[in-house]
Structures are given as C-alpha cells and as structure tokens.
Image (cartoon, rainbow, N blue to C red):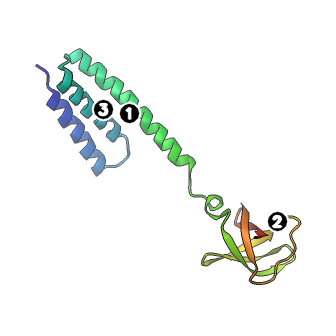
Amino acid sequence: MTFWYVWLLAGLGLLILEMLAPGAFLMWIGLAAVGTGLIILLSGIGFDAQVVTFAVLTALSLTVGLKLRRRRQDSLNTQRAGLVGRPATALSFSAAEGRVRVGDSDWPARLAEGVAVPEQGARLRVEDVDGMVLIVRPE
C-alpha cells in the first residue's frame, strides 16, 4: 500500500514551517515532498522508488532555488543602478564640482570630462556614480 497522503501532508507541513520561520530552504524540500506524493498518487510506485523520487525532486528544487537566489543577489539595488540615466538639475557649480538635484534630493556632483560649467537650473543627466558623487553631463 502506498501512502501518498503522508508525503503530501509532510510537504504541506514543511511549507507551513517555511511560512512561520522563513529562510527559503524548507520550501524547496516541501515542494519535493508534495511532488513525490502526487507522483505516488498517479503511479503507485513502491517505497524504494518513492525515496529515489523524493531525492531527485529535492535536488532539482534546491538547484532551482539556488539559481533564483543568485539571480536576485546579482541585481542589487545599488546607487549606480538607481541613479544612472536619471535627469538632474544643476544647483551650483564651481569649476567641475557642484551640486545637483535628482528627484527630491540634492547630491554632490562632478562634470564629465570636456563639459562646460552649466548655469543654475540647467538640465543634466547622471552618467555615472563615483562613491557618493554623481558624474553628470548636459542633456
């Protein structure tokens, strides 16, 4: 007799534990257990095959989870990612150094090489970020 419902209940229990103590690890094992239960329900495989199925599904689900985690970490919300390309307004410049307004914040800025000093209120575009200093160029 196959106990497909035991696998389903174990998987659902692991998914509930993941909600109570999130860490995105139990979720993948819980999904593998639920998948094993569904495969047993459809095919009626024996205990040895159930264990192998669970192991394979666990390996696959953890691999997917790790790939998703890496992708998410590669796209961090850095200042550079959030500011490059945004419009800016010149507030004041002395030679190549000055301040600009981007959105509702004032930032220290430096002009890109070969750019003339802009007048106050001139429209600029953020070209790069160097630490906390925006590199800007006229639009």
- Which residue sits furthest front? 139
Q: Identify the secondary structure beneath mark 2.
A: loop
Q: Is residue 2 left or right of residue 35?
A: left
- Counting from the top left corner in percent of width and height, residue 122 is at 76, 80
Residue position marked by numbered label 2 in the rendering:
112
Q: Which amino acid does label 3 sit on?
A: Ala
Q: Identify the secondary structure beneath mark 1.
A: helix
Instruction: Quadrant for the N terminus, please.
Output: top left
Q: How far apart are marks 2 and 3 (CA)?
A: 54 Å
Callout 3 crowding tier (Cα within 10 Å): few <14, some 14–19, many ≥20: many
Residue depicted at x 52% and y 44%: 71
Callout 2 crowding tier (Cα within 10 Å): few <14, some 14–19, many ≥20: some
Residue position marked by numbered label 1 in the rendering:
61
- Do the residues under discs 1 and 3 have CB atoms within 8 angstroms? yes
Residue 3 image label: none
Q: Nearer the viewer, residue 3 or 117?
A: 117
**Residue 115, picture quadrant:** bottom right
Residue 32 image label: 3
